[in-house]
Image: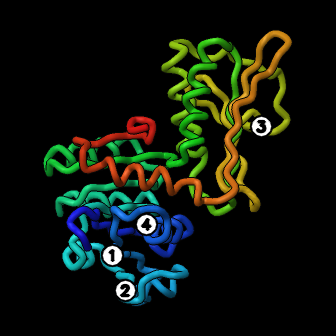
Amino acid sequence: MSAQQIAILVTGARGQMGKYVVAGVMVMDAPDMKLVGAVDPAGRGQPLSEIVAGGPEDIICSGHLGAALEESRPQIMIDFTTPDVAMDNIQAALNAGVACVVGTTGLSLVDLQVVERLCKKTDTPCLIAPNFSIGANLMMKFAAEAATNFDYSEIIERHHEKKADAPSGTALITAKKMAEASQRPMREVSTAHEELSRVRGGETEGIHVHSVRMPGYVANQEVVFGGIGEVLKIEHITTSRECFIPGVLLAVRRVLDLRGLVYGLDTIL
């Protein structure tokens, strides 16, 4: 590894997103990065060549993060796991002085507060983003701008059937950005009679959010605005998880220059 390369460890390496991250670091235009370790209990003992096509045979997937951190000595840990696992991983990495890039969704406000305190304590940065897609982050920016000009809006997010949380972190942060931009709640549309409970979806920041979970989707979101005689739709569609990799690589290149906890890819775009 050259002196200019950033040493990276990937957790959740055998997961749906983890495989793309491993391949992205190795295959895409990332000569300034070097994969030094991978962790996933489901792939313990497997060489990465058996997990990702073209992966190195000399890197064996570990089932224990602590041991992997000590052995591989990474500068950055990339985490795409589950909320309960991610918190343990983040704390282990920060305590070891390893910066974190986290794409795991479903972390609570309390989780973020814990991470923020630990970042300050260890003087080690952590970037957490609910969505690493460049297009999705632009969609959120455009939705926030549109919210200042419309009184009615709803969000429809569509994800694959294996996504554990609902609504998505992207939907929640979109609604938050819209509310912050408009400085007022969206107008409520009252329904006199609902034949099915919660048929109008959940509500956050005065905005109804609808979650769809089924095969065929990766991660799509549509923000719909209604006005007198017109409807505006801002929609982001993904066809492959590869769309997240440019954002992940951007975060890797920037995180070591950050301080504390930074939330959202938009903060470094």
Amino acid type, mark 4:
Val
Q: Observer-nearest residue: 266 or 91?
A: 266
- The answer to whether 124 appears left or right of 216 in the picture is left
Proximity of marks 3 and 4: CB atoms separated by less than 8 Å: no
First of labels 1, 2 by sequence position: 1
Q: CA distance from mark 4 to mark 1?
A: 12 Å
The secondary element bearing badge 2 is classed as loop
Mark 3 falls on what kind of element?
A: loop
* Nearer to us: label 1 or label 3: 1
Residue 87, position as x, y percentages in the image = 34, 57
Q: How far apart are the alpha carbons under marks 3 and 2?
A: 48 Å
Label located before the other in sequence (3 or 4): 4
Please give the name of the residue rendered at 75% of the width and 33% of the height, measured from the top-left corner: 200
Q: Amino acid at mark 2?
A: Ile
Name the residue beneath numbered marker 2.
60
Q: CA distance from mark 1 to mark 2?
A: 8 Å
Q: Secondary structure at mark 4?
A: helix
Please indicate whether residue 93 sits to the left or right of residue 34 in the image.
left
Give percent across and percent down for residue 202.
Answer: 65, 35
Disc 3: which residue: 199
Is 262 left or right of 14, judged from the image as shown? left
Q: Position of residue 237 (x, y in %)?
A: 70, 46
What residue is drawn where x is 69% and y is 31%? 223
Real-space CA distance between mark 4 and mark 2, rounded to the nearest whole angstrom? 16 Å
Residue holding disc 4:
25
Q: Is residue 32 left or right of residue 170?
A: left
Task: Report the quarter where the C terminus lies.
Answer: top left
Q: At label 1, which amino acid type do we have?
A: Gly
